[in-house]
Amino acid sequence: MISRVLGALAGFVSGLLGAMGMGGGGVLVIWLTLGEGIEQAPAQGINLLLFIPCAIPALISYSRKKLIDWKTFMFCVFTGLAGALCGVWLSALLEPSLLRKIFGTMLLLMGIRELFPTPQKKKHS
């Protein structure tokens, strides 16, 4: 029972953070690998599939507010799909333990980067 509640909570937090563009997939992958015992590659695949239904409401909301540059959006869609396909191919070649180390290192580096944000240049009107 507790496992299901924690799983639902991890899914909710992942979706919430993902919809806000804050990388909720990291939460989900960590839960799936540590909490549910799923191997790294399938957990990352589940994360990619979860991204689609989480991104659609965010896309609609930001689009209504006219906050989307559609040319940039399309570029990101196609390059993101290419990157995802290359990542799937590469992850199939790597040992699960190496894949976990790479994922953990990336999470650590992103966390450190967030602790020390780059100052924004002031815009002159």
Image: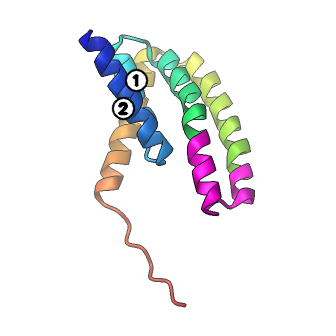
Q: Which residue is mark 2?
A: 104
Image: 17 above or below 114: above
Asked if the magenta segment contains residue 69, the reply would be yes
Closest to the observer, 112 or 2 = 2
The amino acid pointed to by label 2 is: Gly
Q: Position of residue 90 (x, y in %)?
A: 60, 24
Query: 75 above or below 37?
Result: below
Q: Is residue 84 above or below residue 99?
A: below
Q: CA distance from mark 2 to mark 1?
A: 6 Å
Name the residue type under label 1. Arg
Residue 5 point in image, percent of width and height: 30, 18
Residue at x-position 28% and y-position 12% = 3
Q: Residues within 10 Å of mark 2 (few under 14, many from 20)?
A: some
Q: Are marks 2 and 1 in contact (CB under 8 Å)?
A: yes
Please indicate, yes or no, whether residue 39 appears anywhere in the rendered image. yes
Which residue does the numbered mark 1 point to in the structure image? 100
Pinpoint residue 63: horizontal percent, then vertical percent. Answer: 64, 56
The total number of labels drawn is 2
What residue range appears in magenta? 56-74
Res 27 quadrant in image: top left
Q: Residue at x 40, y 23 (%)?
A: 100
Whether residue 101 is visible, yes or no, is no
Q: Secondary structure at mark 1?
A: helix
Quarter of image, res 98:
top left
Q: In front here: 36 or 55?
A: 55
Which residue corresponds to the image point at 29% horizontal and 20% vertical from the top-left? 6
Q: Residue at x 32, y 46 (%)?
A: 111
Q: Would residue 20 be found to the left or right of residue 78 on screen?
A: left
Q: Nearer the viewer, residue 26 or 60?
A: 60
- Give the class, few, some or many, for how many residues have Cα within 10 Å of label 1's Cα (few <14, many ≥20): some
Quadrant of image for the C terminus: bottom right
Q: Secondary structure at mark 2?
A: helix
